[in-house]
Image: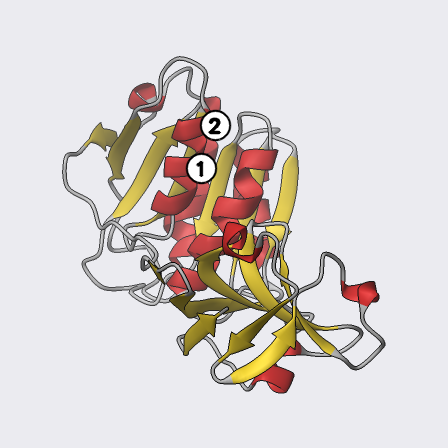
Amino acid sequence: MITLASDFGTPYPAAMKGVILRQCDARLVDVAHDFPRQDVRAAAFWLREVLPEFPPATHLVVVDPGVGTDRAAIVVEAGGHRIVAPDNGVALPAARRLAARAEGDDRIRVYEIAYDDGSTASNTFHGRDVFAPAAARVHEADAVGDADRVTPTEEWVDLAFPDPEIGDDGATGEVLVVDDFGNAIINVPGSVLDGLASVTVNGESAPVRDAYAEMNPGERLVTVGSHGNVEFAVNRGRGDDAFGLGVGDDVSLSW
């Protein structure tokens, strides 16, 4: 299996699939191609949540604001999975979670990908010209290090999500992502809501509920999402609008 994820929309992912299928007969599975455009951190968050649900596979990830520059192309190996991606940190949060869940070998290994031919690779579409053929080669290889034009490296760009500040009577965090439903997800663990009926969010009280439908349609709530973090939502509405929150905003909780 090779999974594909990008911020490309359509039709660019089809070109990557065509390149892969010329080289191997892997089963291709789309993760998403509508990640927020050029938002490496948002893509990294969702990949961390989604990729561990797959059995061991090769994952092709292209969210690449630095396409055409001297940023490297890499393969990250963790927990039996292989993530082919630009060297901008997008693969590292998922790799750490994959490694943490691995039975036995919990190491993360990083390899640099040499371009096939720098003179023929488009400066605007490395997904097709660099990453897709690399994903096919890595998929076909018995071990990542055996793949053509792949060599181990000790240098790569890391990405980590900011840590919240948590006290006895409150917490301060940051909105990491807003999903398509309008749920604003912050970096504060949902465990802070244990036993609470309500919290104060940036100075305004809001109820804490286990499910969206525990509120009437249009009413806002604070809950714990499937990712395990605090999220701000509205039953059948948009939490980001109701709470006045966007990606990167600071959020103060108190109880």
Find disc 2 in the rendering and name its residue: 139
Residue at the left extreme?
154
| Residue 112 locus on image (x, y percent) | 24, 38
47 or 176, which lies in front?
A: 176
Q: Residues within 10 Å of mark 1 (few under 14, many from 20)?
A: many
68 or 241, which lies in front?
A: 241
* Three-letter amino acid code at the position of disc 2: His
Indicate whether 202 appears above or below 184. below
Q: Is the residue under label 2 in contact with that under label 1 (CB below 8 Å)?
A: yes
Q: What residue appears at the point 51 percent right and 81 percent down from the top-left corner? A: 245
| Label 1 residue SS | helix
Q: Is residue 46 visible?
A: yes
Q: What residue appears at the point 14 percent right and 35 percent down from the top-left corner? A: 154
Find disc 1 in the rendering and name its residue: 135
Indicate whether 74 appears above or below 79. below
Q: Is residue 83 visible?
A: no
Q: What residue appears at the point 32 percent right and 60 percent down from the top-left corner? A: 162
When asked about the image quadrant of residue 224, the answer is bottom right
| Residue 51 locus on image (x, y percent) | 54, 40
| Residue 159 locus on image (x, y percent) | 29, 53
